[in-house]
Every structure is written in C-alpha cells, then in structure tokens.
Image (tube, grey):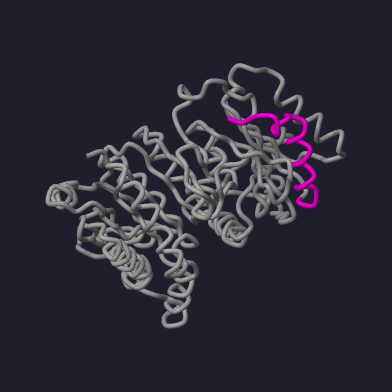
Amino acid sequence: MPVLVMKFGGTSVANLDRIRRAAKRVGVEVAKGYDVIVIVSAMSGKTNELVGWVNETSPLYDAREYDAVVSSGENVTAGLMALTLQEMDVPARSWQGWQVPLKTTSQHASARITEIPTDNINGKFAEGMRVAVVAGFQGISEEGRITTLGRGGSDTTAVAFAGAFEAERCDIYTDVDGVYTTDPRICEKARKLDKIAFEEMLELASLGAKVLQTRSVELAMRYNVKLRVVSSFEEQSDEAGTLVCDEEEIMELNVVSGVAYSRDEAKMTLISVADRPGIAAAIFGPLSEAGVNVDMIVQNISEEGRTDMTFSCPTDQVARAEKAMLDAKSAGDINFHDIVADTAVAKVSVVGIGMRSHAGVAAKMFQVLSDEGININVITTSEIKISVLIDRKYMELAVQALHDAFELEKTAG
C-alpha cells in the first residue's frame, strides 16, 4: 500500500480531545488505503516543563540524561495516540526512536539522523498494522543512548521518514493553515500560498518564518519529499494548506513570494581592525568556535591599514561574540580599538525564485524603504533573496510597505 506520513505538532496533541481529533484525521487516510506513519510531538508545553525540571535539578547537566528526560514527552503522546486509534478499531502501535531504530550521531540535544532502516515497520505493515505512531524528535546513538534532534526536530523526523519510506506525501499538521506571504499578525493583507518552492521555503524558514524547521526543509529538498503544511483545526480537504514542492511543479513563479523578518538581531562592529591578509579568518574563526551564528558581514574601505568590520548575529549570542573577540584580542590574534553592539535592529527580507529572471527587485525594495524614511544598515543578497538590517522600531512598517509594493496580496503561489 502507498505510505503517507502525518506529523502532529504540540498544539495538535495538546490534550486527549485534540489527540482524538488528530486520530480521526489519521483514520480518514487509512480508509483511503494508505499505510500511515504518524510522527508526534510532545503535548504543548510538556517539553518546556521537562527542560525546566532538568535545569532545576542540574544546571550543568549531563547531556545524555537531558535527552533521556526530554525525549519522554513524545513517548507519552505516541502511546496515547496508538491507544486512541486502537479504540477506533484502527490497527496501530507506538514506536520509540530506538525501536525503529532511528539511528543518529552522538551529539546529544542536537543529533543528526544517519539512517532509518525500514524493515521493522514494513514488517509490521505486512502483518496487518495500518498505523505506526512514532515518537518524533528522538533517536539512538551508536553507543545505544537516546538522543534528541533539537527543538523542532519532529518536523525533521517526519521528513526523514517520508524519504526513507518513499512516502507519497508528508503532511505537517500545526496551528496555522499554511505558509503565508508574510506574518498575518503584522500584515492583514497577508495571503496563504497554495504552493511554494523548496528553496523559497528554506530561505523563509532560515530568515525567521517559524512554520517549518529549517533542517526539515533541507531534507525535503534533498529527497524531493512533497511537504504539505495544514491546520489541525480546520476542515480536512485534499486542497487544504500549502504544498512545499519542486519549483517545476509551480505553474507561475512569483518574482517575490514572501517577506520574512527576524526581530532578535544584533549588529556588531569591530572598530579600527588592522587590515591584513587573513584578518577575516582571524575574526570569524573564533566566532564560529564560540557557536556564534554570524549572518550579514560588511567590511569598510581600508584607510591607513585599518578598517571596520560589521556583522550580525542573534541578540542572545552578543555576549558570547564579545567574549570571543576580546579573548582573540588578548591572545594577539586580532587588533581592534573597540567593539560596539547594537541590539535594537531587525532583519527584513524579500524572497522569491522569480528574482533569478527579473531585474530591479533590489532597487524597488530600497526605494520603498527610502520612501518610508527607513535607513538601511547592512545589505546581503543571494540568488533568490535580499535581506536588510534596519532599526527594529521600523520593522513592522517595512514588512507592510514591502508586502504592498510587491502586491503579494494578489499572488497565490
């Protein structure tokens, strides 16, 4: 039988009533003739509670035990979902990561999937099981320890299973009804897209859109897994939600498909750095080793052998970045006069596959921001996106103005 993967996020399984509602959706797909692999998250709020207990018990915790505790939330949901389906006379059983087994690397709390053997689950399908309810977010290391994949890891679990089992589709059930041209809470004209290309979704996810985890989109693109984002709380239909797919499946590619934003950005500047070969490596090497996620980078014109180096990073990594730079200065690896952090900035981006064949998108974006009196601090571009760093107080205005300027309310993917 064809296989369908269905993933239910925390809000979709927040209590027994919602688990029953989700189970009914699974039952509909079973009735259509699918063997279904259901990936479940922990009940809403449960993972945060478990993390809190770990931190309260042991602030400098053993990461192996952290994973043992935090992964338990998904185990509870998987068992309850299997029981609910059994009550509906749907042959189902729950699977923890180690039972599949979902094999991962040994980086606890941020493990990566290495292999998903299909024999065990396919064997049970052959014996008459119709639904495998798999605890998301978890796997097992080579050492036989439970691992977790990082927050949002259930999305990655679902896509990986869809790839391994060559599923017809992977449906991600969540509390939103699809992917929008921008955040509807900021722009009331935001419109749900019927389809969006993998590359566009990957950019939007990495730039702040929180509908899908970035790694899950990377996997879907690599294995060409059709992803559908759909609401758990609306009537079910085959046309519901947004399909994330190969660009060749989209009839007309929009020049701009969406506007993304990231509120928690910081701009950091090293003032008067000695300008010499290897200086960029001397700066960004230590930042990488310190786990600082650097995004935008700008180097000013060199004068008298000195230059300024500006980069952006998440606001919660500013202290780490400052320490890394001061340590490198103390060690004599770099020389600068001062380091300045501006934590009152935001990143706003326009994304669209159509930019590849349309000139003038950047010029239009910059003119729109100029007309609104918004100053641009830093600019970065790629083939399908343009990002700017601006003062945070103008973020919502910028998103609304760009959405209007590119007439995104008129496009439907």
Tally of numbered tags: 0
Check the image and name the residue furthest to the bottom: 57
* Residue at 76% over, 26% down: 364
Q: Is residue 343 left or right of residue 143?
A: right
* Residue at 45% over, 64% down: 18
Magenta-highlighted residues: 392-413
- Residue 71 horizontal/vertical position (percent): 35, 67
Task: Please identify the quarter of the rendering in which residue 3 is found.
Answer: top left
Q: Is residue 42 left or right of residue 361?
A: left
- Which of 372 and 408 lies nearest the eye of the viewer? 408
- Residue 398 horizontal/vertical position (percent): 77, 41
Quarter of the picture containing the C terminus is top right
Quarter of the picture containing the N terminus is top left
Position above or below: 145 against 313: below
- Residue 128 horizontal/vertical position (percent): 16, 52
Task: Inspect the magenta stretch and tell me whether residue 404 lies in it.
Answer: yes
